[in-house]
């Protein structure tokens, strides 16, 4: 999928005939979806002198991009590249070529080229110096318009009429012929911002293999008691080490999460969400174990809890001997049988490995991102659909997932760039 090493594209006879005739209302390249992947594809093409029209269902482009930057615009991550690639899990092999062609260093250089400076935070995450998404998006759209990119808001893609794209608009249905098409329609999370996953049925109807969309970077439901939920909903649990075991292999992360009225959410949960979701799909539930005292070793904790309580209440005993108060002490009471609190060894073991049963992921519409989408075996090395020559796919609509931390945006931009180069080569062969 690297434009310098991939095999040449071969336009179909239908494509050549269609674009030699240039139907009325036709465009050179239609980019459907105005998120990061679609905008990056438009940049590659417009910089090469190709006329690009971007169609988006929403009144303006980049809405999810702006939302992602609301709490601080995390654009990528500065960790070692091999570690970075590992964050893409089972889809590392498919994404590695495009990520090597547009790695985190290249992404930062691209952002700098828009006049936006960046810095590396203490976690290794990379941010714009002002932490905001809006200035970056404004600079980017200004450059795209300067390159001649035309934007068509309130155009919802509803499939094909022969080789032409069909859009519903406030003025009625519109038919658009294009030399090449880049679909960058997002996944299924945050549908109110345009990524509603409705495209899956449209592509499946044309024989495109689709992996079902599933929530990623999501919260989970837990059957809390009413008393616990009422008292602790909204409370952060920190610091803590969370572990989920898959096929006998434990996966652990340290950080924090938040209790909700119906379960758990937050960065630590999101980092483990793929494994937790998959466990629920296999077994109907997932077991999350929590080390509530990550700075304390089990023998020392056992010894401390074995000291006589005297006149101290259980709450004071946990505070003095284990450093547990508030929501952490509440989790112990919520989860453990009463008799364990009088057995120091068992109590200490539970504090270091407290089992919490998750019963379901939160709905896809609430997730930060989604897994599933167009399967990679449906695409060639240029991200072109094998069943629809001249149609390329990019971004979160592809079948991959990654944790938060800049990995999602990096892969969206990298696949958009790769699809842009694929469409560029296609247009060159089809004849401008």
Image (cartoon, rainbow, N blue to C red):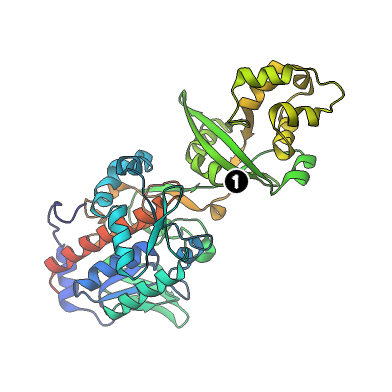
Percent across and percent down for residue 325 are: 73, 36
Q: Residues within 10 Å of mark 1 (few under 14, many from 20)?
A: many
Q: Is residue 97 left or right of residue 366?
A: left
Is 341 located above or below residue 270 in the figure? above
Position of 426 with respect to 383 (left or right) is left
Q: Nearer the viewer, residue 337 or 167?
A: 337
Side of 349 where 53 appears, left or right: left
Horizontal side of 290 relative to 346 (left or right) equals left
Q: Is residue 196 visible?
A: yes
Q: Secondary structure at mark 1?
A: strand
| Residue at x 42% of width, y 74% of height | 155
Q: Position of residue 148 (x, y in %)?
A: 27, 80
**Position of 187 relative to 15 (above/below):** above
Q: Nearer the viewer, residue 86 or 418?
A: 86
Horizontal and vertical percent for residue 164? 29, 71
Residue at position x 45%, y 25% in the image: 247
Look at the picture and state if 391 lies above or below 252.
below
Nearest to the observer: residue 372 or residue 172:
372
Question: Is any atom of residue 393 visible in this view?
Answer: no
- Residue on which the image places disc 1: 265
Residue closest to the far right: 311
């Amino acid at each position: 999928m690297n434009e310098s090493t991939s095999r040449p594209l071969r336009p179909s006879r239908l494509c050549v005939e269609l674009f030699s005739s240039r139907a009325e209302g036709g465009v050179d390249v239609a980019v459907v979806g105005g998120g990061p992947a679609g905008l990056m594809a438009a940049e590659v093409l417009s910089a090469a002198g190709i006329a690009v029209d971007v169609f988006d269902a929403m009144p303006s482009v980049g809405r999810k991009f702006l939302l992602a930057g609301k709490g601080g615009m995390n654009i990528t991550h500065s960790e070692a590249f091999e570690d970075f690639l590992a964050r893409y899990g089972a889809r590392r092999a498919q994404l590695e070529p495009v990520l090597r062609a547009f790695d985190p260093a290249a992404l930062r250089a691209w952002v700098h080229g828009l006049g936006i400076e960046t810095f590396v935070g203490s976690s290794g995450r990379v941010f714009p110096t002002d932490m905001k998404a809006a200035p970056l998006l404004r600079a980017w759209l200004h450059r795209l318009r300067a390159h001649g990119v035309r934007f068509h808001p309130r155009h919802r893609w509803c499939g094909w009429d022969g080789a032409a794209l069909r859009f519903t608009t406030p003025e009625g249905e519109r038919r658009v012929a294009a030399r090449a098409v880049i679909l960058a329609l997002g996944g299924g999370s945050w549908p109110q911002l345009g990524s509603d996953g409705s495209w899956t049925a449209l592509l499946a109807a044309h024989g495109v293999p689709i992996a079902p969309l599933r929530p990623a970077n999501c919260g989970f439901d837990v059957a809390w008691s009413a008393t616990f939920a009422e008292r602790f909903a909204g409370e952060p649990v920190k610091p803590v080490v969370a572990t989920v075991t898959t096929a006998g292999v434990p996966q652990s992360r340290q950080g924090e999460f938040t209790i909700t009225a119906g379960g758990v959410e937050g960065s630590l949960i999101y980092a483990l969400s793929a494994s937790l979701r998959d466990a629920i799909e296999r077994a109907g539930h997932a077991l999350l174990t929590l080390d509530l005292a990550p700075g304390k070793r089990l023998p020392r904790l056992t010894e401390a809890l074995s000291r006589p309580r005297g006149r101290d209440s259980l709450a004071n005993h946990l505070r003095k001997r284990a450093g547990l108060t508030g929501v952490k002490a509440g989790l112990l009471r919520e989860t453990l049988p009463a008799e364990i609190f009088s057995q120091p060894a068992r109590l200490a073991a539970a504090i270091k490995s407290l089992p919490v049963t998750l019963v379901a992921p939160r709905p896809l519409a609430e997730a930060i991102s989604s897994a599933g989408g167009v399967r990679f075996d449906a695409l060639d090395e240029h991200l072109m659909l094998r069943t629809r020559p001249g149609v390329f796919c990019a971004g979160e609509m592809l079948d991959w997932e990654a944790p938060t931390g800049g990995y999602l945006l990096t892969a969206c931009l990298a696949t958009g760039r790769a699809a842009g180069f694929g469409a560029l080569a296609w247009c060159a062969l089809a004849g401008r």
